[in-house]
Image (tube, rainbow, N blue to C red):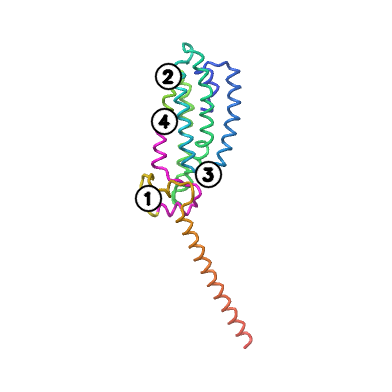
């Protein structure tokens, strides 16, 4: 929607060209600010948390926009309803910037196993740009032909995404890539709800313990190798003296 916000504000809300462009500029600053805020939240709230909050905010914004433009779309609607929809376009950008702008670029590279990581990232990137292309092509047509009904599509899509993310998306924050490989080696169930380790934004204790055991094992092996080298060197010195 960022491509067509001036068009949306002019055609769907009924603003003047100048005011629509001014609000778009202000909205872009808001977009930038909340995109930066997400950097500090992505580990604290987790990928799941940010995506759920972001999607819920987007869905709420589109739902209210749909209702307000139902009664306020030009030329026959009441202007007070169309004007009341403007803050919810801002709400959409805030919600999108804080979660769904950045996390979908990060999540596919983390959630896939080593063997599928590059393929998963490639498919997700291609899907993102194909979807962008479709939305860019249909938005002006949708607003022109469907008027306020066009926003129902996005309301329904965001509402559908919430249970999909909640039930099927494992958390990846504060995990190493090796943690996720270990997760898949255990053949996890498709539905993640009910497993606190999978849903928590904190690193599960079992991964911390496994990492510590691995460090101890490596340190022990390194110590044994060092002692073996030391003994070998001493033997060489004795042979030289003889």
- The span from disc 4 to disc 2 (Cα, nearest Å) is 17 Å
Q: Which mark is residue 44?
A: 3
Label 3 environment density (alpha carbons within 10 Å; few <14, some 14–19, many ≥20): some
Kindly report the distance in space between the C-alpha atoms of the residues bearing marks 4 and 3. Answer: 27 Å
The residue singled out by tag 4 in the image is 157
- Specify the quadrant of the image occupied by residue 242: bottom right
Q: CA distance from mark 2 to mark 1?
A: 44 Å
> Residue at (53%, 36%) from the top-left corner?
98
**Residue 195 image offset from top left, x and y in percent:** 39, 48
Residue drawn at x 53%, y 20% as measured from the top left:
9
Is residue 118 among what the camera can see? no
| Of labels 2 and 1, the one closer to you | 1
From this viewpoint, which residue is outermost toward the right?
A: 241
Please give left or right for residue 23 compared with residue 122 in the image. Answer: right
- Name which residue lies at 41% across and 40% down: 166
Marks 1 and 3, how far apart in space?
Answer: 24 Å
């Amino acid at each position: 929607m960022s491509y067509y916000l001036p068009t949306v504000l002019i055609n769907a809300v009924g603003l003047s060209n100048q005011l629509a462009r001014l609000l778009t500029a202000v909205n872009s600053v808001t977009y930038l600010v909340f995109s930066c805020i997400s950097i500090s939240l992505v580990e604290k709230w987790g990928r799941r948390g940010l995506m759920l909050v972001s999607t819920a905010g987007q869905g709420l914004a589109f739902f209210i926009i749909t209702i307000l433009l139902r009664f306020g779309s030009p030329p026959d609607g009441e202007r007070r309803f169309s004007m009341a929809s403007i803050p919810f376009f801002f709400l959409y950008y805030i919600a999108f910037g804080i979660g769904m702008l950045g996390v979908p670029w990060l999540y596919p590279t983390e959630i896939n196993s080593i063997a599928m990581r590059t393929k998963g990232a490639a498919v997700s990137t291609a899907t993102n740009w194909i979807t962008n292309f479709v939305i860019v092509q249909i938005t002006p047509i949708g607003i022109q032909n469907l008027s306020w009904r066009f926003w129902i599509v996005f309301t329904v899509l965001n509402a559908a995404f919430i249970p999909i993310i909640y039930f099927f998306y494992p958390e990846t924050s504060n995990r190493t890539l090796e943690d996720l490989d270990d997760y898949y080696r255990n053949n996890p169930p498709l539905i993640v709800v009910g497993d606190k380790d999978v849903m928590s934004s904190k690193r599960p204790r079992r991964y911390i313990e496994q990492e510590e055991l691995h460090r101890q094992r490596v340190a022990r092996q390194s110590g044994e190798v060092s002692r073996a080298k030391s003994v070998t060197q001493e033997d060489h010195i004795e042979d030289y003296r003889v």
